Image (cartoon, rainbow, N blue to C red):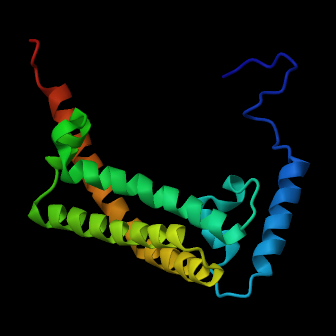
Amino acid sequence: MAEDHGVESPTLSRPTFNMDFDKKVERIRKDYASIKYELPDIDKLDEDFGILSSLDKYTFILRDIEVIIAKKYSHYIQFFESLRNPKNNSPIFLAFLKSFNDDDLQEIMDIHNELSKEIIKNWKLDVVYSEENTAKTILEHYNNWQTLKFRILKILEKGNIDLLKRDKSENNSNYFC
């Protein structure tokens, strides 16, 4: 337990609110609410993609939201590409892959393909910007993410459980005895 020296611990103190951040979030909410297209709830979108904290300055709010969403999809595409093509990757990917059966490997390919389709939507928007198409794509990304995130989580959990089992069995073996 930490000693109390009369100085408040930054991790234990009450949070302070940044007024600039609060104003920024209020402005984003107002601008988002004024958009005439069907969109996901801003708080739900923020929960999945971190929109409110990531959106600093924007010219086209929908375009900038789309970029933030694309970054998340790109992150997971890279992960699943590493699982599909582990040749030049770190040993953790090889160990992770040993956890999967044929059905899991098929699921990895299916998820990768779905993520790829989402990224292609972003590329199309990059070529020709349309506020209406961007709004539709944000809604599609959000809706697709609602099922994808659980499928991704299932893969991550299965690989992690098997890594933990393997780690425990290696620790219990008397290799050095």
Along the viewing direction, whichever of 14 and 83 lies nearer the viewer: 83
Please say if 171 is above or below 99.
above
Along the viewing direction, whichever of 77 and 40 lies nearer the viewer: 77
Q: Quadrant of the C terminus?
A: top left
Residue 101, x across and y down, in percent: 11, 59
Question: In which quarter of the view is residue 103 placed?
Answer: bottom left
Please say if 5 is above or below 132.
above
Q: Residue at x 57, y 61 (%)?
A: 67
Left or right of 47, for residue 5:
right
Q: Quadrant of the N terminus?
A: top right
Answer yes or no: is residue 148 visible.
yes
Q: Residue furthest top?
A: 177
Please say if 29 is above or below 14.
below
Residue 24, x across and y down, in percent: 83, 58
Q: Residue at x 24, y 70 (%)?
A: 110
Question: In which quarter of the view is residue 53 placed?
Answer: bottom right
Marker count (numbered): 0
Left or right of 160, for residue 125:
right
Residue 25, x across and y down, in percent: 80, 61
Along the viewing direction, whichever of 91 and 161 lies nearer the viewer: 91
Q: Residue at x 81, y 44 (%)?
A: 15
Question: In which quarter of the view is residue 156 placed?
Answer: bottom left
